[in-house]
Image: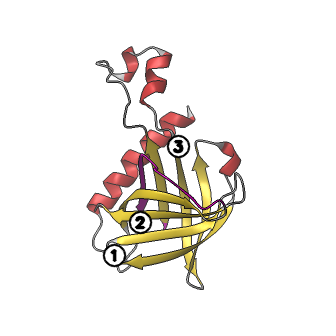
């Protein structure tokens, strides 16, 4: 059921972003993650198909797999394993405020309940169409950067 909520939230937020007037907040928009850098281990990874969607008060993340199989059925006619093959690999919905030059985001919903209710304080750098988030990842405590480019 939670995965269906994630898809509903994504659809709602995308609709909201597309219908709202211009924001004075330069971070508002749709951002594609181009790389994730683990600053502790000094490694870089390809995030695949991961996006951040920022509105004036909410952030949504969604990540999927490029190689998802094409299932020529709607969800009502799919078997459980076919539905699971179509769902995002990760995602979350957070409220946020910018305080003292950092993003203070609280996870309202995530595909993993481990992250729900957690406050994440994120440093960020915005340079035109490039955005970088930097914070400690709850899963392992490593300091990471998420490098993004503006899609919309």
Residue pictured at 47% horizontal, 55% vertical: 60
Would you place residue 129 above or below residue 107 in this image? Answer: below
- Residue that numbered label 1 is attached to: 23
- In the rendered structure, does residue 47 fall within the stretch colored magenta? yes
How many marks on residues? 3
- Residue that numbered label 2 is attached to: 55
Identify which residue, 74 or 145, lies in the foreground.
145
The magenta-colored residue range is: 41-57
Identify which residue, 42 or 152, lies in the foreground.
42
Residue pictured at 45% horizontal, 50% vertical: 46
Question: 10 Å neighbourhood of mark 1: few (<14), some, or many (≥20)?
Answer: few
User: Which circle marks residue 90 in the picture?
Assistant: 3
Would you place residue 126 above or below residue 6 in this image? Answer: below
Is disc 3 in contact with disc 1, using a CB cutoff of under 8 Å? no
Q: Earlier in the sequence, mark 2 or mark 1?
A: 1
Label 2's element?
loop
Q: Earlier in the sequence, mark 3 or mark 1?
A: 1
Residue 139 % position (x, y):
70, 51
Residue 18 % position (x, y):
27, 59
Residue pictured at 57% horizontal, 69% vertical: 134
Is disc 2 in contact with disc 1, using a CB cutoff of under 8 Å? yes
């Amino acid at each position: 059921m939670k995965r269906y909520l994630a898809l509903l939230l994504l659809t709602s937020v995308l609709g909201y972003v597309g219908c709202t007037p211009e924001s004075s907040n330069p971070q508002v928009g749709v951002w594609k993650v181009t790389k994730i850098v683990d600053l502790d281990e000094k490694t870089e990874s390809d995030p695949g198909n991961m996006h951040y969607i920022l509105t004036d008060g909410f952030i949504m993340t969604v990540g999927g797999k490029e190689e998802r199989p094409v299932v020529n059925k709607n969800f009502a006619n799919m078997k459980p394993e076919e539905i699971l093959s179509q769902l995002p690999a990760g995602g979350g919905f957070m409220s946020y405020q910018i305080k003292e030059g950092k993003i203070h985001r609280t996870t309202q919903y995530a595909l993993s309940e481990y992250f729900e209710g957690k406050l994440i304080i994120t440093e960020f750098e915005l340079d035109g169409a490039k955005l970088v988030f930097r914070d400690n990842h709850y899963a392992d405590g490593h300091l990471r950067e998420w490098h993004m480019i503006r899609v919309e």
